[in-house]
Image: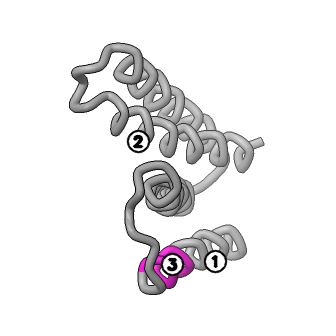
Amino acid sequence: MAWVFLLIAGFGEVSAMFFLKMSNGFKKITPSLFAVLAGGASFYFLSLSLRDLSIGTAYGIWTGIGSAGTVLLGMLFFKEPVTQKRLLFISFIISGIIGLKMVS
């Protein structure tokens, strides 16, 4: 279950960043509330995963999911540039996540 909790935590991190962007600097109440709730849920599920996973592995994967997912969301929803270099470096992050999973 630790890996499931970590995956949920990663998606919670991506959701929190999405709603944080939508909140316009906490000026919009509904997205602000969702950002705080998603962030809290992300930390909660990360803490559950830490019962069985090493902190280095769990944190690395959690931040990797958050980073790669947030960049992809930015490209899809906020018209951020899609370039070969950005996609290359996202693939490096994803490779690191897979590598950490394989060695733990």
In primary-sequence order, the first of circles 2 and 3 is: 2
Tag 2: Cα neighbours inside 10 Å, few (<14), some, or many (≥20)?
A: many
* Residue that appears at 51% across and 35% down: 42
As drawn, the residue found furthest toward the top would be 29
Question: Does residue 51 appear left or right of residue 76 in this picture?
Answer: right
Mark number displayed over residue 17: 2
Type of colouring: one colour
Q: Which mark is residue 79?
A: none
Q: Which mark is residue 87?
A: 3
Above/below status of 14 relative to 97: above
Quadrant assignment, res 1: top right
Q: Is residue 30 magenta?
A: no
- Principal SS element in the magenta part? helix
User: Depth check: 90 or 10 in front?
Assistant: 90
- Residue at image coords 59%, 72%: 94
Q: Position of residue 93 (x, y in %)?
A: 51, 73
Closer mark to the observer between disc 3 and disc 1: 3
Q: Magenta residues?
A: 86-92
Which residue type carries mark 1? Gly
Q: Which of disc 1 and disc 2 is earlier in sequence?
A: 2
The image shows residue 43 at horizontal and vertical percentages of: 48, 34
Relative to 86, residue 22 above or below: above
Q: Which residue is mark 1?
A: 99
For marks 3 and 1 on the same chain, the one whose residue lies earlier in the sequence: 3
Residue at 32 percent across and 14 percent down: it is 29
Query: Residue 34's x, y, as percent?
Result: 45, 22
